[in-house]
Image (tube, rainbow, N blue to C red):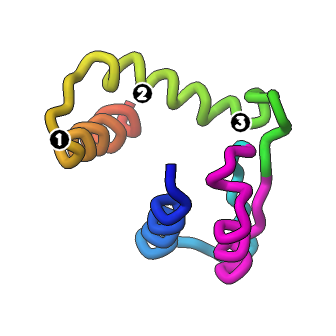
Amino acid sequence: MKTESFLENLDKVILTQKVTKDLILHSDIGSQYTNDPYGAHLGELEIRHSFSGEGCPYDNASIESFHATLKKEEVYQTYYQTFEKASTKLFQYIEGFYNRK
C-alpha cells in the first residue's frame, strides 16, 4: 500500500464528489493514513482527519460491514484476470447492485 495511491484516490474523490467545507475524513490508523505526506495533503485540502481508536473496529462499523459484504458477495466469488477487470466488476457491484438495494 503506497502513499501515492491513497493521495491519488483522495484527489479523485475531491474531483468527482460534491466536497464541501468542513469535510471530515474518517479512517483507521493504518500507516497509509497516518504518515506525514497524507496528513499534509489533507491539511492543504482543509480536510479534518478523524481516526478510529486503536483496536476498535466499532468506531467504523458501517464501513467494516460494507467491506465484509463486498468480500462475501463479490470478491471471494470471482476470479479477476486483470486489475482493470476487477475495477470494473467492483464498480458494477457497488454502483449497480449494492447502492441500489
Disc 2 or 1, which lies upstream in sequence? 2
Left or right of 35: which side holds 87? Answer: left
Q: Residue at x 20, y 31 (%)?
A: 80
Left or right: residue 55 versus residue 94 is: right
Q: Nearer the viewer, mark 2 or mark 1?
A: 1
**Residue type at mark 2?**
Leu
Camera-side residue: 60 or 35? 35
Precedes in sequence: disc 1 or disc 3:
3
Q: Residue at x 43, y 68 (%)?
A: 12
- Give amino acid for label 1: Thr
On the image, numbered disc 1 is attached to which residue? 82
Between 5 and 98, the one nearer to me in the picture: 5
Q: CA distance from mark 1 to mark 3?
A: 30 Å
Provide the secondary structure element on which disc 1 rests.
Answer: loop
Residue 40 placement (x, y as % from top left):
71, 75
Rendering coords of residue 20 (x, y %): 63, 75
Alpha carbon distance from label 2 to label 1:
18 Å
Secondary structure at numbered mark 3: helix
The residue labelled by disc 3 is: 60
Q: Closer to us: mark 1 or mark 3?
A: 1
Instruction: Identify the amino acid type marked 3.
Output: Asn
Give the farthest residue toward the right: 53
The answer to whether residue 73 is above or below residue 66 is above
- Label ID, residue 70: 2
